[in-house]
Amino acid sequence: MVDDARLADLRRKFGRAPAAPSEPAPAKRTPREAQPRFRGLESGHRACQGCGEALAARLVVECAGPDVMIANATGCLEVFTTAWPESAWRVPWAHSLFENAAAVASGMEAAMKAKGRNTKVLAFGGDGGTYDIGFQALSGMLERYHNVLYVCYDNEAYMNTGIQRSSSTPHAATTTTSPAGKERMGKRHLKKDLLSIIAAHHIPYTASASVAFPQDLQRKVRHAMGIDGPAFLVVHSPCPLGWRHDSRLTIDVARKAVECGLFPLVELERGALTNVMPIREVRPVADYLKPQGRFAHLFSDDVRAQEERDHLQALADYNIQVYGLTGEGQDPADTGGAAAVGRSGRAPRGNDGAARRVS
Amino acid sequence: MIGDMIETRIHGRGGQGNVAAAYLLAAAAFEAGRYCQAFPAFGAERRGAPVAAFVRIDATPIHLRSQIRTPDYLVVQDDTLLLDPKITAGLKADGAMLVNSTRSGEEIGAHFDCRAFSVDATALAVAEIGRPIPNTALLAALLTLTGEFPLDALAAALKKRFHGAVLEKNMALIEHAADAAPKGLWARETVDA
Amino acid sequence: MREALEGSQAIARAVALCDPDVIAAYPITPQTHIVENISKLVAEGDLHTEFVSVESEFSAASVALGAAATGARAYTATASQGVLLMAEVLFNIAGMRLPMVMTVANRAVSAPLSIWNDHADSMAVRDAGWIQLHATSNQEAVDTTIQAFRITQDTELPVMVCMDGFILTHTLEPIDLPSHEDVRAWLPPLEFDRKLDPADPKSMGMLVTPDFFPEVRHSHHSAMQKALATIEQADADFESAFGRASGGLLTVEGDPEAKIGLVAMGSTVGTMRAGMAHFQAEAGPARLINLRAYRPFPSQALRDAVRGLDHLIVIDRAISPGLGGILGSEVAAVLSSAPDAPRILNVALGLGGRDIPETLYPDLLAAVRDPDAPAFSVFDADLKKLAPEDR
């Protein structure tokens, strides 16, 4: 039995007009004005359980909005948010094609400039639309110095079409186009070092983030929003379906990727490394690989399995070395370190032994 | 080939200002109150390769858009091109050929069995503008020979295309080149006032 | 003001008269001079626009799309391979019903590589959902460009202005450019209701399931058919404001009693007009139909225009290998429902820039009287150049 009074109260609270208004309708409010607080990406969309991309996109838009517009590449994010006639977006949003989000965003930004408006343009793409098919348009946008924040939701394969390998798929991961078998141990090639390529455009700001570290992610978005020029953010966004891990493990898996060094969280300005999230307690790569079915073949008796695990460990060690990810000594940037806070809120183990709070 | 239309084909080498010559001649005709049409033989040629351009001038609007096969006038900016028989092909029986050359017009005319006149336009251009660009000198000579419209029209067209020192030098050049050609030598009997 | 201008330069200036907010383009022969002239106008401060010099035609169309989505007046130009590289975006722009104008400097499509004119490029995207208008002269190209900006905002259909590469783009001829004030008075500001705006957020380019896709396509088709009237009206309005028309949907000239007609598009019309005037005595009376609107296709206007003809020569400047002429096939389809439809002789002329001399005119009229003439041929192909097995 529905309590009409309570329903009306809830509707009022969440800004939805009562079904049969008994008093004159108030002045028309936009969907945004009708919201209790700004949320660029509404709930109710059709993402899978535990979708890292949906979470990441919500965190980004919540932090960036409301005076933004988005050019979205074809991919899961577009499909699960905008099945006509419903849209989960509460900011102006356009999807054109798979490979042109950066160019469409360039056009939006040029139009804002022509009209003397300050609305910030965001471009969203997955790793397919960013590392691969949309790479040229992205490079062009960065080179032309458009005032656009490009966010790549990196789930390391073409998930929208059903888990095919991309140039962002990690070495040895299986996908439907890089399966493991008698002759193969998953993807034969390395994950493309996109960040270095982006940084080589010498744009004001390039950064990586992870859904496992929302404060860090939002801090980076805020920083990028303040830049008058191109900024690029890649967000590691697990896909439970494609990575074949339990839906409830999304954050856990994403955190382990950072903690083992395979997905370093770094910031670069004008091409130079300016900040990294240090790892207090480096995990073995196997901790990250183990929960994921895409790496299951690396834990078989096959002699090649150990080789590939060693290879991935070497890649993580390399990242830790080149980016200087181990947190040693007093480092003011260290407060948000990857091992700073556990899920249970246990005290982090800083170098001075004192508890630290996440800023 | 139609009515009183005058068709001119200009031959040169890439870099000699062949298209510019065609555009200038047409623009001069426009300044003189005529309808005109000028276009290059669209090629992918690079500097130094033989190139051609076409100019139609008429008292009425021009609809025809094909290349000029039977020109009234030929303008040849580089006499080494005359070794190619295609250059002189189709010249009307009562047509005439203007060549940038140190050879005499009589010699060239006798060889090709047509009316011909020559100007050492390269030397004139080098003397006046310091660069071997013979096109404006040849156009000045052509206008003087044909008397189709006054040199002032060419000067007006030049003024719309060039400015400053380049314009002044070209103005001097066309005066000199006009002096080098006999007035009205090729004047058409049917020329309209 | 009348000036002697190169076609490309005139187009650049016509675009500038229309106050575009955003121009995005990538150079390709023979469109290059349009982009260069626009760049020059911007550099000299004669055109205040956001000119985005992109890294590919694909991005040129995408940038224009993004700009149009925000309600900005957008323009781009390309040709040939550029049209094909844009193809995916062109379908997208039209499907999103975004207003914009694009000049296509028509050029053949590789392979073999050809920089010269034919209509293979715009024909390849005829089903993209764009309005396609052809110009027979640079004056028409200029006037049609200005009209296109009005048509696109009235219909929310993107408009492609097709002009023959080199033949028009690189030809200098007298052109009357209207004044900026007059164009501003004639062309109302762009008001695009569906624009992206943070004050009233909308989503566009959404996923449409089979539940609604056929309805979307139907409405697009229906909008294109309604655009026939808009195109005619824009030309009529332009004529009353500026004193000259650009050909509405199509124009008919020549002898109304003639039994032979010709249909052509673009600069070929001018050459056929010259041929008709010159060879009237030996070739006999004829009627010349200049098809200006290729998309939407003016089916009824064409049926009216061919009434009384026994023979109709349809000149294509592109072919669909394995079928024949594209325009010819469409004209045949449209006339199949007309009573006493003329017999059609479909010829392809001028492929890959083969010059079309006016002397072909009497040959065409002779061919139409020849009962053994094939229904379709690449009329100016010299088969002796081919190995016997390829003829």
Image: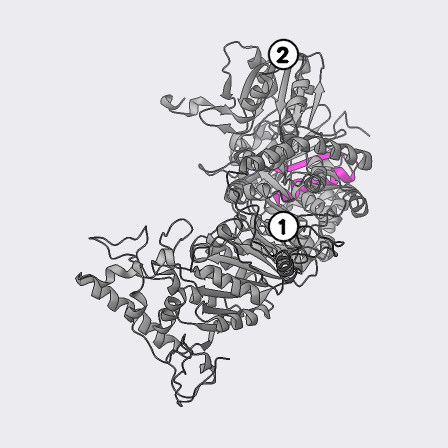
Residue placed most toward the observer, A135 or C98? C98
- Above/below status of C131 relative to C59: above
> Dot 2: what SS?
loop
Residue placed most toward the observer, C13 or B81? C13
Relative to C120, C281 lies left or right: right
What's the residue at 35%, 59% (across, down)?
A243
Q: Is residue B1 visible?
A: no
Tell me whether marks 2 and 1 sit on the same chain. Answer: yes
The residue singled out by tag 1 in the image is: C69
Q: Amino acid at mark 2?
A: Pro
**Direction top: furthest residue:** C371
Structural distance between the alpha carbons of marks 2 and 1 = 45 Å
What's the residue at 59%, 46% (across, down)?
C32
Relative to A341, C379 lies left or right: right
- For label 2, count other residues whose C-alpha is less than 10 Å away and answer few (under 14), some (14-19) or many (20+): few
- Is residue B22 found inside the magenta-colored segment of the image? yes
Query: Which scheme is used to colour this image of the protein?
Result: one colour
Q: Is residue A257 visible?
A: yes
The residue singled out by tag 2 in the image is: C339
Q: Earlier in the sequence, mark 2 or mark 1?
A: 1
> Dot 1: what SS?
helix
Q: Chain of mark 2?
A: C
Span shown in magenta: B16-42
Q: Residue B176: percent from the left, percent from the top? A: 72, 47
